[in-house]
């Protein structure tokens, strides 16, 4: 059960924002329901995450690989479960998804995937990224993609921390 109440989502003050969220996300997920406790934060969050998920040139495969790894590291089950369908749609296989928890010995990932996973680990666990971890990222991605990957990792660390700190309820099946 969430640590603070979800707001009354029928409040006319947030009606337009609620409608925008539903239009962009398909429904009002519990994450966004909780964010509606602060309409300005909800609006900024929606704009930022819409840019990350829908307006970047970074491949969905790379984005979802990073998101799932962040969810594993941060023990954010809501985030992991929510993104498995997106990962499958983006071309990750179920065996790859299963291997994300212990990716280093796995042979299921390409060199670029391994660079993304190492970069995600470093940004999430250590914050500071060593040159040894960053060098393969520069080899596989152009500056725009590096910027978008870095922003994606930062954004989804925000998501998992928000979800877990407030113990937001998982979506019903």
Image: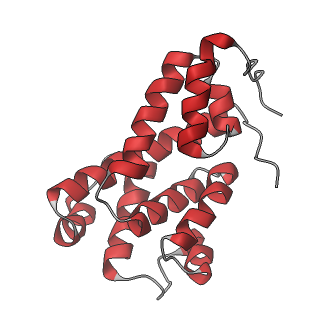
Horizontal relation, residue 150 to residue 65: left or right: left
Horizontal relation, residue 46 to residue 14: left or right: left
Residue in the image at 55% along x and 17% along y: 39
Residue in the image at 62% along x and 11% along y: 13
On the image, the x and y values in percent for residue 2 come to 78, 31
On the image, the x and y values in percent for residue 32 come to 62, 33
Q: Splitting the image into 4 quarters, where does residue 3 fall? A: top right
Q: Splitting the image into 4 quarters, where does residue 10 fall? A: top right
Residue in the image at 32% along x and 70% along y: 115
Is 127 placed above or below 40 here? below
- Count up the numbered dots: 0
On the image, the x and y values in percent for residue 161 come to 57, 38
Q: Nearer the viewer, residue 126 or 11?
A: 11
> Which colour assignment does the render follow?
secondary structure
Is 143 placed above or below 109 here? above
On the image, the x and y values in percent for residue 146 come to 24, 56
Give the residue at the far top of this rendering: 13
Q: Nearer the viewer, residue 110 or 10?
A: 10
Residue in the image at 48% along x and 46% along y: 156
**Can you say which quadrant of the picture contains the C terminus?**
bottom right
Is 14 placed above or below 77 here? above
């Amino acid at each position: 059960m969430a640590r603070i109440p979800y707001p009354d989502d029928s409040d006319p003050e947030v009606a337009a924002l609620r409608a925008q969220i539903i239009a962009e996300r398909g429904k009002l997920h519990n994450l966004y329901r909780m964010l509606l406790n602060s309409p300005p934060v909800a609006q900024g969050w929606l704009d930022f995450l819409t840019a990350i998920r829908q307006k970047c040139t970074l491949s969905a495969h790379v984005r979802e690989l990073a998101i799932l790894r962040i969810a594993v590291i941060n023990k954010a089950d809501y985030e992991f479960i929510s993104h498995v369908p997106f990962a499958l749609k983006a071309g990750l296989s179920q065996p790859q998804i299963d291997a994300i928890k212990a990716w280093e010995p796995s042979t299921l990932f390409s060199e670029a995937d391994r660079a993304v996973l190492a970069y995600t680990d470093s940004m999430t666990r250590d914050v500071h990224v060593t040159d040894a971890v960053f060098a393969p990222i520069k080899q596989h991605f152009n500056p725009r993609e590096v910027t978008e990957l870095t922003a994606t990792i930062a954004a989804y660390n925000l998501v998992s921390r928000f979800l877990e700190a407030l113990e937001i309820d998982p979506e019903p099946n």
